Amino acid sequence: MIKRQIATYDQAVEYIMDIPRFTAKNTMEDTRAFLHRLGDPDRALRILHVAGTNGKGSVCAYMRSVLEAAGQRVAVFTSPHLVDVRERFVIEGEMIGEDSFLEAFLQVYDCLDWNALAAGEGYHPTFFEYLFFMAMLVFARKNPDYCILETGLGGRLDATNAVARKEIAVITHIALDHVEYLGHTLGAIAGEKAGIIQEKVPVIYADSCPETGDVIRERAHSLSAEAYPVSEIDYRFSKISNKNIDFSYISRYYGSVSLSIPTIARYQMENCSLALRALEVLAGGQQAADWPSLRLSQEILKRGVSACFWPGRMEEVLPEVYLDGAHNEDGMRAFLESVAADGYSGDRHLLFAVVADKDYPAMLRRIVDSGLFHRLSITYLENKRATAPAEIERELAAYPQVRAAQYRCVPEALEAILTDRPPHERIYIAGSLYLAGEVKAALHCRKEERGSYDQF
């Protein structure tokens, strides 16, 4: 591998996007050693670490929004991005600029041992590791009050787990996903997620399954870490009103707190409650005098929750067009539960696309069995992991009652579906975060061309 001359933001992005083609997963020891070589930027940060199968990004978003409502400066590293790679790096609500991105890229780039790499040896970060290192450098330079890190895959061996110290660990809902890497049982996957727990660092977790809860509690106990479960007894659904969900969160300090979240996704009640419980634990356990104290109140919780926005999670991207990032069987289950409870009385239309390494037969079976959609459309993704058209056709052959329209690409599907939409039809789009990204990119292009999203 020969060192290139990289001087622009576009060149840096191109290099990062090419990384999966020439590097493999590194050991945690290698990741930690390179972080040390960069000057241990993580040690300057007060880190809140989030792992889990579904809901990680939403929990990060709720924590960030409430912390900001409490007057804190917050940096967040999440994945994946939907359109722009800089979405992964957010400081005080804004993604970093191109200059900051390039500066951090070059810091990592110049720390690589290019002589060893040229000889076919030496360490090179994976795609995700490279972005993680950049995040640590950018965030350390900006010196936020809190830094929220979302794991990429698993937890125990994830690059984000290389940090030296965390304030809290949060584990969201766990389900069967990425089984080829994490294990074929819920217990095995929970073990990987629980790998983010550190000695005497509190862990807040979604207690939705005995098999996963037992693993997390045992891991926490072995590390003398306090474990705080969050389950359905910690929140109460009230109603969906004006496309908001009203519910009550059972606070450790304030009793029942009435909240309203700007979404129709019922699964966000759990994610929001996890985030609030984590911040309450954080606020209650603060001891370091050299950090600004975190003060919460019912008003701060309400203001932060109501202001939270996380794209691609039952997001209304056009009037009566909802985009959701459901990308595995459990995510599809949660998505369908929200659709079933949304109170809509008209017809529903689903646009679906999926990548090949997901259990898409199970996802399609849930969709068909739900009986929620009077129309189904299939499109294909511009991604090397996309499911081949023939595979989806083969799965749908098992459901002769289903007639699905098929489209070659996302822009074509959107054009047809939105142009020919009958009155009183609500459109949902789900199946992959890549689909969410392509939809957002297509809508942005349409707006740039025609001046409005609505001119379909």
Image (cartoon, grey):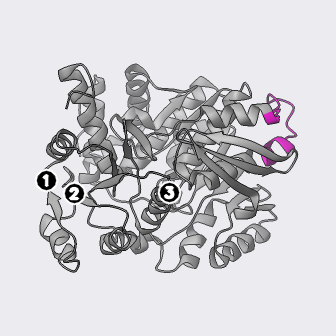
Between the C-alphas of marks 2 and 3, the distance is 20 Å
Between the C-alphas of marks 3 and 1, the distance is 26 Å
Front: mark 2 or 1: 2
Badge 1 element = loop
Q: Is residue 170 left or right of residue 319?
A: right
Between the C-alphas of marks 2 and 1, the distance is 8 Å
Q: Is residue 280 left or right of residue 428?
A: right
Tell me the residue at 56%/54% (across/down).
266
Query: Which label is found at residue 377?
Result: 2
Please say if 284 is above or below 380.
above
Tell me the residue at 35%/74% (across/down).
362
Which badge, 2 or 1, is on the more N-terminal residue? 2
Q: Looking at the image, which is closer to me, 355 or 117?
A: 355
Tell me the quadrant of the picture where the C terminus can be found.
top left
Whether label 2 touches label 1, CB < 8 Å: yes
What segment is highlighted magenta in the picture? Answer: 280-298
Please say if 319 is above or below 125.
above
Q: Main secondary structure of the magenta part?
A: loop
User: Residue 72: horizontal and vertical position, in percent?
Assistant: 70, 27
Identify residue for label 3: 338
Identify residue for label 1: 407
